[in-house]
Each structure stands twice: as C-alpha cells, then as structure tokens.
Amino acid sequence: MTLHLYFARRFLWLYLSVFAGFFTLTLLTEATGLFGQFDGSKIGFTDTLRLAALKTPASVYQLSSMIAILASLTMFMGLSRKSELVATRAAGISGFRSLTAPIIVALIIGIISVAALNPMAATALRWFESETGRYETGTTSSFSLSRKGLWLRQGSDQGQTVIFADKANFDATRLSGVTFFEFNENGIAKRRIETGFAILATGAWQLGPGKFWNINEPNVVPDRTAEEFQSLTLASELTSDQILDSFGDPTIVSIWEMQSFIDRLERSGFSANKHRVYFHIELASPILLAAMVMIGAALSMRHARSGRTGLMVLFTVIAGLAVFILQDFAQILGSNGAVPVLAAAWVPPISAMLFALGLLLHLEDG
C-alpha cells in the first residue's frame, strides 16, 4: 500500500507540474496573440492579460490527454533511471501492479476535470467571446436557446435589437414566428415587430407580413397606432456563420447543461450532432487519460541502461499525438454524421487502452 501511495503522489505531482507548465506557456502564447489585435480599442496590458487568462483554461483543458502521457513518461523514466522499478520488480511487484496507482489517479483526475474544470473553462470562454466582441465592435451580439425557442441580440451604434423566434432552419437564415424588440442607444424600448418569418440576407433581415407597435412615444397608445406591413427590411450585422458558430461550439456549454442544451437545439431546428459527440467524448475522457498513462508507461518502463531511451521518448510522443489526432478525426466524422455518435466518442479511448495493454504485454512479458 505504501508503494502504491508513493506512485500515486508522484504521478499526481508530475501531472500538476506539467499542467502548470502548459498553462503558463498557453497564457503567454494567447497574450502574445492578443497584443495589437484590437487596434481601435483602448485595451492595455492588464486587459490583454485578463482576456488571455479567460481563454487559457479551455485551451489547456483540451490538452489533458497529452499532459497525462507526458506526466506518465516523466515519472516512469525517472523511476527507471534511479533503478526504483528494478527494486520494485525484485520485491515481486510486476509492472502491471506498478501502474495501478497512476491509472486510478488518472481516472480520478479525468472525473474531476469533467465535473469541475469543464464548466469553469466553458464559462471563462463565454466571457472571453463576449469581451472580445465588445472590444472589436463596441457592442455585443449574443445568442441563447430557451425551452420555447431561439433568442438573438444584435447591436449597433443606434441601439440594440432583441430577436425571438419559435424555430430556425438548418443554416439559421430563415426564422419562423419572429418577434423583434428594438431599443435605442439609451436602452429604452422604441418598437416591437411581429412577423410570421424573417430571412437573413446580406446586411439585413427581410421580414414577411406582420405588424409593428411604436413604444414609449409621448401621448401615444401603442395598440391604437399599430400598423401592419407586407414586407419590412431591418439592418443587421449578423451573419449565418455567426449564429451557427455561437450554437456550434460545444466548448462554451458546461457538461452539466449539455443535455438540456441539445434538447433545446433540436427543438429550434438545429443539428445537435456536434454537441452529442462532444458530450460523449467528455464522458469518455477519464478512460482516455488512463490509456495515455498506460502508453507512456509501456514505452518508458525499460531500464535506462538498456539504451534507446531517446527513441522510446520519441515513440511515446508520436503515439500520444496519434491518439490525439485519431480522436479529433473521429469527432469530425461523428459531427458530420458519417459515423455513429457513440462510435466516434468511445472507440478512440478504448482503442488506445487496448493498444497500450498490448504494448505492456509485449514489452513486459513478451
């Protein structure tokens, strides 16, 4: 038990150290990329660093599997170099048993990451998107889904417009059952527009037959001055890509809210394949971390004096990158509907674990 606790503490310390290194490097990289991006805005060093800090957690979170394999590689290379693994085997403890504690720690880290780090990273990324939109245009455009339909908000120098729609088509260029709420630059409502449909054209919404009410005009009763129209054009800076990207990026949605978000997405007429694949990939991530630990151990448990250490390190990094790329490729196929969602999410981590198990059997007992 004491030996397993030693291995567990050592792996946890190395994982946290590698994580901190990646976090610092990513923070500096993001900050460097943000410098000079907002030329027309008054954004200083502090604001740039704050924006980078908001984006960094999501970027590092996506690299959890690579952090796990590097921590495993570093740990077992250190144990081999100090002949600790030789002493362990001499005491009758096989390489498989030596892996028990790091694998359990990796599973626990994976579960904690999904349950806690994922929501934190998603929230920080949403704040980042909102802040960068404000710095770029001076106004914000936001998008959300409710149980009853789709909410959009577009901004300009003249004010804000809030849009509610019962449904949308697959590319968000046609909304059905639409209500527009227009506000002036002071945030005071000035007009409400209802229409059966609205089509997003270049730089404008083209509205079908409907009715509008002028609001907050002195000595005017909105219902008495309401006017009907057969068509109406409203200026807009929104594009189909902006709307789809806002709903198409699953990393901004917390794992705890994902299932309800998927239901709302489908009720609004959008495809939820990308979010379903991401949801199952997150659920499978603890298995992937454990598989990465096994791969890192399998290629670094040889005694340092046996040579070819550099080659084993290279093979370990290549194997980790191969699994990382395979998962991304499977995610793309699953998002496009080319393969079933469960296969796209669960096959890569299970395949990685079977590959690592085969390596261990060959190198340890082969």
Image (cartoon, helix red, strand yellow):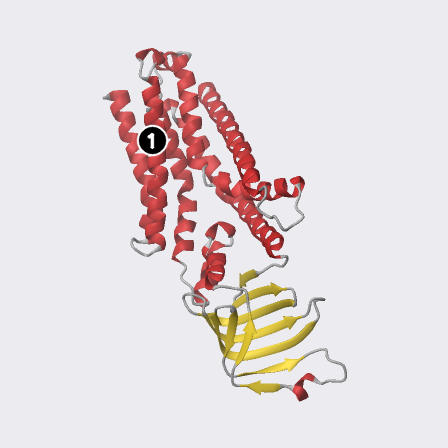
Corner quadrant of residue 220: bottom right
Corner quadrant of residue 298: top left
Q: Is residue 288 left or right of residue 139?
A: left
Q: What residue occupies the far front of the structure in this picture?
A: 39
Question: What residue is pinned by disc 1?
Answer: 318
Q: Quadrant location of the C terminus?
A: top left
Which residue is at 54% across, 41% downward? 33
Corner quadrant of residue 272: bottom left
Q: Quadrant location of the N terminus?
A: top left
> Is residue 309 depicted above or below 18 in this figure?
above
Q: What residue occupies the far left of the structure in this picture?
A: 366
Which residue is at 73% across, 80% downward? 217
**Is residue 278 or residue 186 the one in the foreground?**
186
Which residue is at 43% across, 54% downward? 275
Q: Amino acid at mark 1?
A: Ile
Q: Is residue 146 visible?
A: yes
- Residue 305 lies, in percent from the top left, at 34, 10
Mark 1 Cα-neighbour bin, 10 Å: few <14, some 14–19, many ≥20: few
- Residue 19 lies, in percent from the top left, at 51, 32
Q: Is residue 85 left or right of residue 108?
A: left
- Residue 336 lies, in percent from the top left, at 34, 56
